[in-house]
Image: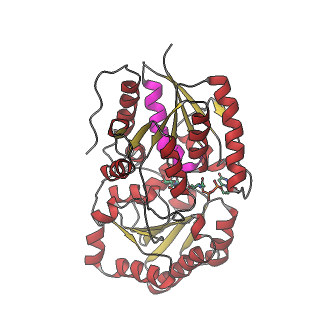
């Protein structure tokens, strides 16, 4: 019997980052791959499953409109208990810091099933920033047997917490594996509104959704965008709005009727990645985009006060601008009007991986099961 490895994910970013790994696990002759989605997100998850042609073996379909943290966690745990009962996996793989991540790790631990954590070791050391993700990933780390840290910074956080070096593998981030397959010079957008964008205008790509930014911080960022477009006539904003109704209400109320602002539905990842590649700059509170845009040479202004992804800040391509309207406006205005400031940030830097993270993770899992005698080299 081959060791059975069950991959669990539920939201859009987990799906994008787990898709390359699911493919790599399925390609391994030494492992049996099973895929379970909680569907903490429904439409935004299905977009990714369709794009990467992944048909999950289990779909818990737990999403509710305006779901609460406890309710989501409860539905995920209940569904996973049944799936584990049926499949009895040898190893469970979770990703990142969502409710699905923590639920997968906890439900596996209660069965004494080994847990592998992909994108392990990210920390802000602030309990409420981001909320509740910082605590979700710390709790998941406690339950984890195999830590797949994307960078040496993440590995060092784990070591400082007393995690055994033997159980940590530095792999790079699987998002770079995904990005290598999606960005193409001759790409044609599937979204008709993107095909109609005025090429003479410089595009600011915007996404906002974090719980700690609900309400005033998102409203402040929207006001900053309005002011920017008044001052900079050759700029436009493209804003794929998260399906969360709490986010939509604020964004549509503020930017719904604005000239040179395109509010659109969430894009499929290929459209979004190629939009990033053709953009001028990015304004976002997303985690994933802080990893994607730097490798495309696009400056990212992060609408947050702290980040668990310091590597691109250190490399100079990501800047934390906070949640104050004037600070956001000033930072973006500066990049739109000062070429030297723009060039200083628009350097293609990629501290997050070489596109082979999934292969390293599969090798590490094979090594864990004694199917491979050499430990994979860490990504440096
Ligand atoms: C969750 C994750 C967050 C991640 C984000 C990615 C947690 C605690 N948070 O955010 O870490 O950055 O996903 O986007 O796990 N909705 C839909 N259709 C969808 C997706 C969402 O209608 O396909 C709506 C639903 O009303 C849902 C709401 O959005 O209740 C919020 O979804 P949820 O997964 O709870 O979002 P967050 O916790 O904000
Ligand atoms: N993304 C996408 N379509 C969009 C906006 C974002 O496919 O319209 C992708 C993006 O490339 C990144 C991921 O979604 O890989 C980020 O998801 P999100 O911002 O929802 O979550 P976070 O990364 O903050 O957890």
The x, y position of residue 184, in whole percent, is 38, 48
Q: Is residue 123 above or below residue 281?
A: above
The x, y position of residue 104, in whole percent, is 59, 40
Residue 95 visible to the viewer: no
Nearer to me, 335 or 192: 335
Q: Is residue 244 left or right of residue 162?
A: right
Q: Is residue 95 above or below residue 92?
A: below
Q: Is residue 136 above or below residue 367?
A: below
Q: Residue at x 44, y 54 (%)?
A: 273
The x, y position of residue 260, in whole percent, is 53, 75
Q: Residue at x 28, y 59 (%)?
A: 348
Q: Is residue 14 magenta?
A: yes
Q: Is residue 100 magenta?
A: no
Quarter of the render that holds ligand 1? bottom right
Q: Residue at x 46, y 72 (%)?
A: 305
Q: Which residues are magenta?
A: 10-27
Residue 66 visible to the viewer: yes
Nearer to me, 343 or 70: 70
Q: Residue at x 29, y 64 (%)?
A: 314
């Amino acid at each position: 019997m081959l060791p059975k490895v069950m991959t669990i994910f539920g939201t859009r970013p987990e799906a994008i980052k787990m898709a390359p790994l699911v493919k790599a696990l399925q390609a391994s002759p030494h492992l049996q791959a099973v895929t379970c989605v909680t569907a903490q997100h429904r439409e935004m998850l299905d977009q990714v499953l369709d794009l990467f042609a992944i048909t999950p073996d289990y779909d818990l379909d737990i999403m509710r409109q305006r779901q609460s943290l406890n309710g989501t966690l409860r539905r995920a745990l209940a569904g996973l208990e049944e799936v584990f009962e049926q499949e009895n996996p040898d190893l469970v793989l979770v990703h990142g810091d969502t409710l699905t991540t923590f639920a997968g790790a906890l439900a596996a631990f209660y069965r004494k099933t080994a847990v592998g954590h992909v994108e392990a070791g990210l920390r802000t050391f602030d309990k409420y920033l981001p909320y509740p993700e910082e605590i979700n990933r710390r709790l998941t780390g406690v339950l984890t047997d195999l830590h797949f840290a994307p960078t040496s910074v993440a590995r060092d956080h784990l070591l400082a917490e007393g995690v055994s070096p033997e159980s940590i593998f530095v792999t790079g981030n699987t998002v770079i594996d995904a990005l290598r397959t999606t960005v193409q010079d001759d790409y044609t957008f599937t979204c008709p509104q993107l095909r109609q964008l005025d090429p003479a205008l410089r595009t600011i790509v915007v996404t906002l959704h974090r719980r700690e930014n609900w309400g005033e911080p998102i409203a402040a960022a929207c006001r900053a965008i309005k002011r920017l477009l008044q001052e900079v006539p050759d700029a436009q904003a493209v804003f794929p709005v998260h399906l969360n109704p709490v986010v939509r209400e604020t964004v549509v109320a503020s930017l719904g009727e604005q000239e040179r602002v395109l509010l659109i539905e969430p894009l499929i990842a290929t459209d979004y990645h190629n939009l990033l590649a053709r953009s001028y700059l990015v304004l976002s509170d997303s985690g994933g985009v802080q990893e994607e845009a730097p490798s495309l040479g696009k400056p990212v202004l992060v609408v947050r006060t702290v980040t668990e992804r310091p590597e691109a800040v250190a490399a100079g391509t990501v800047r934390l601008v906070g949640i104050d309207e004037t600070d956001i406006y000033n930072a973006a205005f500066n990049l739109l009007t000062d070429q030297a400031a723009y060039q200083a940030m628009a350097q293609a830097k990629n501290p997050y991986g070489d596109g082979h993270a999934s292969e390293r993770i599969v090798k590490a899992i094979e090594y864990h099961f004694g199917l491979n005698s050499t430990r994979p080299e860490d990504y440096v």
